[in-house]
Amino acid sequence: MSAKGLLLVGHGSRLQYNKELITTTAEMMKESGGDYLIKSCFLEYSNPTVAEGLDLMRSEDLEILIVVPLFLAKGIHILRDIPKILGLEAGKKRGTFTLADGRVVPLVYAEPIGIDPLLAELMLKNAANAQTLPEDA
C-alpha cells in the first residue's frame, strides 16, 4: 500500500543537539499520527544529507513525496540550495521523483515555517520559561 512520503529537512550543524532537534521532531510527527512515512535529513554538517534522504525515500512505496524544510524563513538555502538538490526549476514548488522501481511520483516542496501564530505562541512560551531560570544560569 503506497504512502505519502514526508522528508523533513533541517539545516544541520556540527553540534549534536541541533541534529537531535530535527530527528526528535520527525519522531514526534510520526507519533502524532497521520498517513505520512516520515524521514529526516540535513542540508549540511549532519547525516543523512538531503541527497541521502532522497535515496532512502526511493525504496519506499510512495504515492507522493513532500519535502518540508524545518527552517523559519526563506533564504538562500530555501530558495536555491534545496530546490537544486530536489531537481526543481527556479521558483517552482512541484516536480517529480523517481522511485527505485522506476515509478515516477509527484514531488512537492513545502514552505518554511514563516509567519505563523503558533510561532508567536512558542516564543511567548520561551519567554515565560526564561523567567524561571535559576539565577546562576
Image (spheres, grey):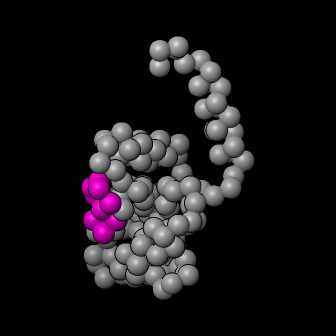
**Residue 87 appears in the picture as rendered:** yes
Residue sitting farthest toward the bottom: 89
**Residue 3 appears in the picture as rendered:** no
Q: Residue at x 34, y 50 (%)?
A: 13
Per the image, is 50 magenta?
Answer: yes
Per the image, is 54 magenta?
Answer: no
Image quadrant of residue 111? bottom right
Image spot of residue 63 (x, y percent): 46, 71
* Number of residue marks: 0
Tell me the chief SS of the magenta region.
loop
Image quadrant of residue 132? top right
Q: What are the residue bounds of the magenta stretch?
A: 44-52
Residue 101 vs residue 64: left or right? left
In this view, 96 is above or below 115: below
Residue 115 vs residue 91: left or right? right
Image spot of residue 22 (x, y percent): 41, 47
Image spot of residue 130 (x, y percent): 59, 25
Choose between 73 and 19: the one closer to the eye.
Answer: 73
Q: Residue at x 28, y 75 (%)?
A: 100
Image spot of residue 15 (x, y percent): 32, 43
Q: Residue at x 64, y 38 (%)?
A: 123
Which quarter of the image is occupied by the N terminus?
Answer: bottom left
Residue sitting farthest toward the top: 135
Residue sitting farthest toward the right: 117
Image quadrant of residue 39? bottom left
Choose between 101 and 70: the one closer to the eye.
Answer: 70
Choose between 88 and 133: the one closer to the eye.
Answer: 133
Q: Residue at x 32, y 60 (%)?
A: 44
